[in-house]
Image (cartoon, rainbow, N blue to C red):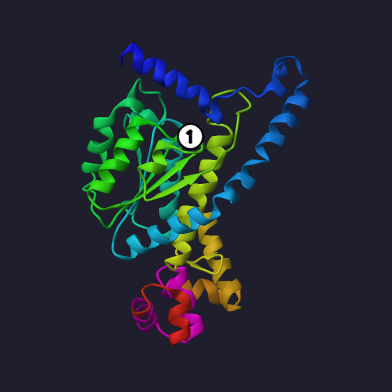
Amino acid sequence: MTPADNDALRSQLFSFSTERIDADLADVDTWPTIDMVRAMNERDSAVPAAVAVAADRIADAVDGITARMRRGGRLIYVGAGTPGRLGILDASECPPTFGTDPELVVGVIAGGDRAVRTAVENSEDDTAAGADDLRALGLTERDAVVGLSASGRTPYVTAALEFARSVGALTVGVASNPGAVLSANADIGIEVVVGPEFVAGSTRLKAGTAQKLVLNMLSTLTMVKLGKTYGTVMVDLQATNAKLRARSERTVMEVTGVDAASASEVLGRAGGSVKLAIAMTLGGLDAPAARAALDRAGGNLRTALERG
């Protein structure tokens, strides 16, 4: 990077709201701990309202991602540092929560797997890697790529979105500053402006919280629209431990009204599938017939039950 590039970056950083200093906290390091806690909590409480401002764009992204996934595409998160880690976290929670294939929702981070736990120097500035990492996934026009960057200008992420657009994938940018470069490089720009951080420039704080809330919506609401829930109930969860096996039984009981013994019995016949067990119970069907009904409904339990 040339001296001129450094000067331009320095000027740009000073214009970012997330880089500004909160004047009301100028002497926070001298405050009693309880006052620090209250001040930080007060600032954090403003994040949901900032997310609400971007509700329309988030809804557009959910609809776009859902449409791509219905065509057999994937949801791919791309980020550097904290945003990259948050994307990986969200992706990793989808299989146990919604019973999805681990390759359906994917998190990509600048610097690779090592960067999940350790900062990888200069990885966020590696534009070539931004494209290469998506190319390695065999990205196609059926996929949706969500770029995450608090500043909205992270080179690795913007390059990844540019590549994604070049192959026809849906592109979504999530930033914490207005007028983000990321938004200009995306089909849908989601800007959640959270203002100065409690520690100036530490965007793992309010910006990170905002990103987590947006990711919660993108993945969860997409899965709801894809029929991975019945109302708010997780009917595609994978019962991989005792807690989840108990939740599966309780879910069948709550949705169908049967007792514990009956729920356990039908889950056994359904091979542990909550969705199949509910379809069998409410539809009065055996396992093959209930499975066929779900297949005809594209896996949507409500649709399968309504069609009979």
Please state if 53 lies on the left or on the right of 124 as rendered.
right
Q: Is residue 112 above or below residue 138?
A: above
Q: Is residue 76 left or right of residue 253?
A: left
Instruction: Read off the residue under disc 1.
Output: 150
Residue 279 painted magenta: yes
Name which residue lies at 34% across and 56% down. 101
Q: Nearer the viewer, residue 177 or 62?
A: 177
Q: Quadrant of residue 63?
A: bottom left
Residue located at (62% from left, 22% from top): 21
Which percent across, then down, holds residue 48?
A: 62, 46
Q: Position of residue 170 (x, y in %)?
A: 33, 53
Q: Is residue 90 above or below residue 180?
A: below
Secondary structure that dominates the magenta span: helix
Residue at the (34%, 30%) spot, across then down: 155
Looking at the picture, which amino acid does disc 1 mark?
Answer: Ala
Within-10-Å neighbours for mark 1: few <14, some 14–19, many 20+: many
Locate the C terminus by quadrant: bottom left
Residue 307 can be seen, yes or no: yes
Can residue 241 be seen from the camera position used here?
A: no
Residue in the foreground of this view, choosing between 242 and 244: 244
| Residue 79, horizontal then vertical, whole percent | 39, 37
Q: Which residue is drawn at the image coordinates 25% and 53% (left, top)?
A: 168
Q: Please state the extent of the stretch shown in magenta in the rendering.
A: 268-295
Q: Residue 58 in magenta?
A: no
Classify 215 as above or below 1: below
Q: Quadrant of the N terminus?
A: top left
Among the 4 quarters of the image, the one containing residue 136: top left
Residue 89: image location, x then y, percent? 45, 42
Q: Quadrant of residue 116?
A: top left
